[in-house]
Image (cartoon, rainbow, N blue to C red):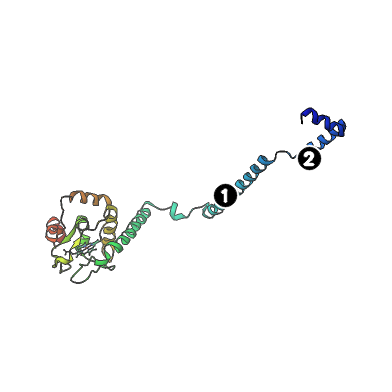
Amino acid sequence: MTDQDSKKQASEFMTDREMVEVHSRLNHEKHPPTKGFLIAPLVFVFVFGCLIFVCSIQLAHSTNQFQLHPPKEIVELTEEEREALRLERKVDSGKKVFAVRCASCHQANGLGIAGQYPPLAGSKWVTSDPGLITNIILKGLKGEIIVKGETYGTSAAVNMAAVPISDREIANVTTYVRQAWGNEAPEILESEVSAFRDASKDQIDQWTGDQLVEMYPAAFSE
Ligand code: HEC
C-alpha cells in the first residue's frame, strides 16, 4: 500500500479535524525522553551522601584529638628535659634489643650464668671504654676473660658470636646495658659505633680477650 493510498483510506474514515485531534492527544501522551536524565541526579545524591558520611566521621575523629591548648609537656619542655626524654626513649629501645639479642645468654637481670655466660652488671668490659663493648658486639669474643674476678670462655663451646645488628641498635643496646642494673656509664652514640665498625673492618675473626685487653689497657688498669 502506497502512502497516497493510506492517506486516502484514512481520510475516508476520519475528518481532518479528527485527525488533528488524535495527533495532538498522542503528542500529549508521549513520554519525554527521561532515561538519561533520571540516572545522573541519583548518582549525585549517592556520591554526595557518601561524601557527607565520610566527612562527618572524619570530623568526629579529628575533633576528639583537637586541643585548643596542647599539653604542657609537649610545648614547654626545657632543652634538658627534652634531652632526658630522648635518652629515655633510646634506653627503652635498647632494652628491647637486649631482650631479643642478648638476654638468652646474659639473662634479663644482666647476671649471666655462672661458669658460662659472664655478667654484664658491674662488668668493666661494659662500663669502661665505649670501644670495648661495641667491638665485642660487632665481632664477637672468644678465649679466656676475667669478669668480676671469675674466669669465663675457658671452653670454646661458649664463645660469643658477633651480633648482627645495625649501628643504631648497637648504640641503643650498649647505652641500655651501660645504664642498667646499677651500671652508670655514659651513652654511646650511633656515630661512635659506625666509627668502631669502620676501624675494625679488617678483624675477620672474633676478638680474643687478650687482644681487647691490649687494645684498652686503661679499662683493666686497676
Ligand atoms: C650466645 C650467647 C651470647 C649472646 C646472645 C650474647 N653474648 Fe655476650 N658473651 C657471651 C659469652 C660466652 C661471653 C664470654 C666470651 C669469652 O669469654 O670469650 C660474652 C661476653 C660479653 C661481654 C664481655 C664480658 C662481660 O660480661 O662484660 C659483653 C660486654 C657482652 N658479652 C655483651 C653482649 C651483648 C650486649 C649482647 C647482645 C647484643 C650479647 N653479649 C649477646 C655470650 C653471649
Q: Between residues 74 and 152, which one lies in front from this camera angle?
A: 152
Question: In this picture, is 55 found above or below 108?
Answer: above
Disc 1 designates what residue?
55
Estimate the x, y position of residue 46 in percent, counting from the top left.
62, 47
Residue 82 shown left or right of residue 207 in the figure? right
Q: How many marks?
A: 2
Looking at the picture, which amino acid does disc 2 mark? Glu
Estimate the x, y position of residue 74 in percent, counting from the top left.
44, 53
Task: Give ligand 1's quarter of the image.
Answer: bottom left
> Which quadrant of the rendered structure holds the C terminus?
bottom left
The residue depicted at 79 percent of the width and 27 percent of the height is: 4
Disc 2 designates what residue?
29
Tell which circle, 1 or 2, labels the residue nearer the N-terminal end: 2
Question: In this picture, is 75 found above or below 95?
Answer: above
Cα–Cα span, label 1 and label 2? 45 Å
> Which quadrant of the rendered structure holds the N terminus?
top right
